[in-house]
Image (cartoon, rainbow, N blue to C red):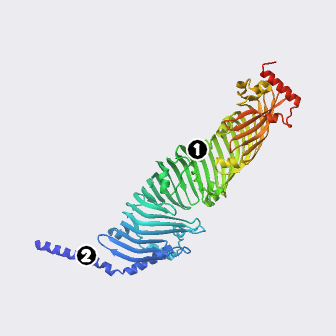
Amino acid sequence: MKKRTRVLVITAGLFLALIAIGIASLPALVTLDDVKGQVTETLSRATGRTVTIHGLGVSLFPWLGIRLDGAALGNAPGFGRTPLARIAHVRIEVRVLPLLRRHIVLRRVVLTGLRLNLEENGAGVTNWAALTQGASPAPKTPAAARAEAREAPAFTLLRVAGLTVRHADIRYRNARTGSRDTLADLGLRLGAIAPGRPVAVEAHARIETAGHLPLPLRLAARATYSASGLTLSALRLQAADLVAHGHLAVLRTAAGIRASGDLAVPAFAPRPLLAVLGIHYAPRDTHVLRQASADIGFHWDPAVLRLAPLRLTLDHTTMTGTITRTARPLFYTLHLSVDHLRPLTYLPAPAPAAPHAAPAAAHAAALSPAALNTPLVADIACGRLRVHGLVATQVSAHIRARAGHALVRPLRMTLYQGRLVGSAAATLGTAPRAWRVHARLHGVQVSALLRALHLFPEFSGALDAGLHLRGSGTTLAAAESSATGRLAASMAHGTMRGVDLDLIAKDPRALVGAHNAKLTQGTAFSRLHASATVAHGVVSMNTVVLHIARAVIHGHGRVTLATKSIDYLLAVALPSGFVIPVRIQGPAGHIRFSVSLNRLFSDSSPNSVGTTLRALGGVLQHALGGH
């Protein structure tokens, strides 16, 4: 019995030794150059590109391993001699026993040193389009179909235990825009891959763009692959201090690739992110750009990108709505609602003026040609808008922009208990930038309006007005100094504080100060009409008609917007027919009212000598206490 056992052990050992010797000598029996030639020929025929492999190796222990060194895929015609893809090393490990059942189970796939060069030429054609579209299969003859049916079934990929990508670079160059972007030092790790089962995904890389600092990225997700597409759940994307969570679904349909999903970005500080991106931006208000967040749903296909629903917050402002980008022709459509906004606080802080700088240097730089030529249609609603001290509520605007021109029509808002309806237009591609405004105001409280404009709050009442103005510049000072056009205004009831013109018409003693306390109380009027022309920031009031209790007052003068000063002359008619000229002068907030003696005795005065003397006599008599 012992002898029999010994024989069996020796026989089994010899058998295993023969198997080991055979397996060890198998790579020497296989001509790898022939295999490499067949692989490159098959891949070249399948892709329509030249495929080269520098080295090919096979190992059998402990796994069936295949190693490719220096593999490259040629570029498309017309895109140069640089390969579309190049890989330094590829290592593939395969389980042996499943191969006997024509099943492929990959233990591990490792790609090292991938270089992918993606290009788009001036006509919008890419060097990878033909590979993603695939070639149409050639029609089969009946004999070929029968022969294929008799063949053994093909190998089936059952499972990939893991995929690792190390030190990869993906470069993209667009000849139309001149942009060059790189996803550098890409690292990717995938867990076990099987159709319909989720797989863990981890990736990191840097985005490198000309003129900007590298932006580090990290991604983690659970990916599920099926015949219809790819789904990323539990997605976490980090770019510098910005972290986004959400999910993404990429579907392959008959019409092409489609993607949809949502992203949520918790509150983060925009300023450090701008610094990492190399954007040196200092707003006028140092308290803005402190915090931002976003909740974005999106849908993408080759024709349309749609962001909906959209919710963005910046500092204390919240914006909701939708943004749609149409690819061909390029077009943007926006439907946005904003709770409150102070847009001018986000404008760049003015740079210090050089001692000998040209005047045009003080204006903001023109927008890029690409931004100017991009068509846009937007419907904007804003609950509260503050611009240059003006505060409007319930603002709605329809905006169209194209080829450097922007038109806002209609423009509606509630303005200081009244309404404004009008339109505005701007030319954005020039410096200084031109603008024009047409508007009608109804029932606007004029004291609040003038106070916001730093003009003359001495006037109060409900204002109806029409204005047509044009000018240039983006700052308030530039707009005031360049404003040109016309305006007309009327008020049904109101008050002019600082002087009582009705008292002057009633009691001449007010002229010499006998009733000075009453004189400064103000003038109540039942109606006011005014018309003016505006030329380079100077408002010339051609006609002013003021109806008070005892007279109709006419006047004319001018207002200089840049200095906020007024120079006005009113003619107050006494019951006797004598006309007293009252001059209104001074800067906003410090207006002085006085009788113009030069005007009183001038040749152009409507007063006769006798009327003037009688009026002065009456004044002196009242001043001395006579009757």
The x, y position of residue 500, in whole percent, is: 74, 28
Q: In this view, does 123 lie to the left or right of 38?
A: right
- Residue 341 circle label: 1
Is tag 2's residue or tag 1's residue first in the polypeptide sequence? 2
Q: Which of 176 and 555 is in front in this view?
A: 555
Measuring from the top left, give residue 53's x and y in whole percent: 42, 76
| 407 relative to 547 in the view: left or right | left
Residue for point 88% across, 31% down? 609
Of 465 and 159, the residue lying toward us: 465
| Residue 439 visible in the shown view | yes
Instruction: Judge whether 172 appears above or below 571 on screen.
Output: below
Asked if marks 2 and 1 touch (Cβ < 8 Å), the reply is no
Image height of 573 relative to 288, above or below? above
In this rendered view, identify the residue nearer to me: 74 or 45: 74
- In the displayed structure, 390 sits above or below 626; it is below
Q: Mark 2 points at which residue?
A: 20
Q: Is mark 1 on a helix, strand or loop?
A: strand
For residue 24, which quarter of the picture? Answer: bottom left
Q: How crowded is mark 1: few (under 14 residues within 10 Å), some or many (20 or more)?
A: some
Image quadrant occupied by the N terminus = bottom left
Q: Could you tell me the amino acid type at mark 2? A: Ala
- Whole-percent x, y for residue 284 in the image: 56, 48
Name the quarter where the C terminus is drawn. Answer: top right
Nearer mark to the viewer, of 2 and 1: 1
Which residue is at the far left? 2
Between the residue at mark 2 and the residue at mark 1, the CA separation in whole angstroms equals 79 Å
Quarter of the image holding residue 433?
bottom right
Which residue sits at x=39%, y=81%? Answer: 33
- Would you place residue 563 above or below residue 369 in this image? above
Mark 2: which secondary structure? helix
Tell me the amino acid under the disc marked 1: Leu
